[in-house]
Amino acid sequence: MWVYIARRLLWLPVLLVAVSLVTFALGRFGPGDPVQVMLGVRYEEETADRLREQLGLNRPFFVQYGDYVWRAMRGDLGESIRFRGRPVSELLGAKIWVSFQVSIAALIVSVGLGLPLGFWVAHKQGRWEDPTTVSLSLVLMSIPIMVTIPLMLWAFCLKLSWLPCSGWGGFWDVRIIIPAITMGIPGVAGLARLMRASTLDVMGQDFIRTARAKGLSEVVVDARHVLKNSLIPVVTVISLSLPGLLSTGIITERILGIPGLGNLAIDAIFNRDYPVIMAITLIGAVAFVLANLVADIVYTLIDPRIRYS
């Protein structure tokens, strides 16, 4: 197992180089001039050339990229173009923690409701609960988050006055309820359908019939055999849900005024703040690689028959 983990981690630098090279190229050759954005109405060609010289933007592409990689290897992600003089790592530190709390809250909603619901519906196959729940899941998955957030704000903030309409107060603040629900509900629908399909597949296996033939009660069969084996394909989706929530969090944070990574990403894109964009892209790549690795490790905990060499 440790050899497998080490081998997977050795691929991480290769992946980061590939991701950073593509992102760096898009930032340099894509439309938009960060210097023009920085100067705004004060733009003058002479001032712009001097600023490009100061920022090193007039150097050859691979010289700029090599310099960025060398500094990144030492933990220096550069300075923000938008917020001059502020290191990117300083900007991202607090933002990452805020987005992580929002994503964890949404994942708790998705897993806490989706897995039990899917497991329960699988045992109701052929009854009215099964198609009703599946249909409701499809409806919930099809509603864009841009629609659910205004509806929840209208209902819980304006009409009922149960919750604040925007802002951020931490994980234990009531203002986390709306982003957690709006980001978590689509996950509830997806996990419920996946858990239902996985449970039905396991329930049809020979070893389940053997366990019942031995006289084991349904509770014991479900707890010892059905549930554990049903979780194996679901683990992959759950492990990738947390980094995947970053894309959903961009919209949620922007609408609700949450000072997280998603809000910063939108500002960085509009302001051509390439160092910030690069750092956020690399963080996303690392998150997905580690999520896959965690999923592989959890497989062995759920099913001891799975071994990696």
Image (tube, rainbow, N blue to C red):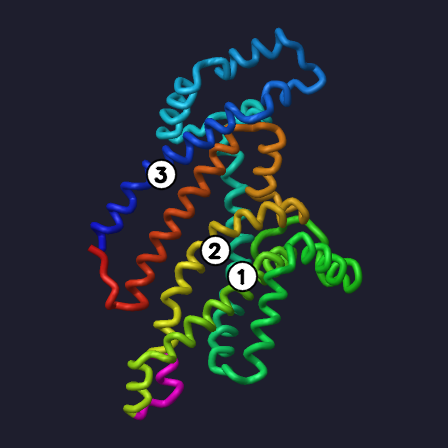
Q: Secondary structure at mark 3?
A: helix
Q: Nearer the viewer, residue 97 or 214?
A: 214
Q: Nearer the viewer, residue 233 or 253?
A: 233
User: Residue at point 49% right, 65% down?
Assistant: 191
Mark 2: which amino acid?
Answer: Ser
Magenta stretch in the rendered image: 215-224
Q: Which residue is mark 1?
A: 187
Reading the chain from its start, which is encountered first: label 3 or label 2? 3
User: Residue at point 68% right, 58% down?
Assistant: 148
| Residue 200: image location, x then y, percent | 42, 76
Q: Which residue is mark 3?
A: 15
Mark 1: which amino acid?
Answer: Gly
Does the residue at mark 3 contact the one at mark 2 (Cβ under 8 Å)?
Answer: no
For the C terminus, the quadrant is: bottom left
Reading the chain from its start, which is encountered first: label 1 or label 3? 3
| Residue 44: image location, x then y, percent | 66, 10
Q: Which residue is mark 2?
A: 241
Q: Secondary structure at mark 1?
A: helix
- Is residue 217 magenta-colored? yes
Q: Secondary structure at mark 2?
A: helix
Q: Which mark is residue 94?
A: none
| Residue 101: image location, x then y, percent | 53, 52
Relative height, residue 93 to residue 136 (above, below): above
Mark 3: which amino acid?
Answer: Leu
Numbered circles on residues, count: 3
Q: Residue furthest right?
A: 159
Q: Main secondary structure of the magenta part?
A: helix
The answer to which quarter of the image holds residue 37 is top right
Does the residue at mark 1 contact the one at mark 2 (Cβ under 8 Å)?
Answer: yes
Q: For marks 3 and 2, give the CA distance.
A: 20 Å
Badge 1 local density, few (<14 within 10 Å), some, or many (20+)?
Answer: many
Q: For marks 1 and 2, give the CA distance.
A: 8 Å
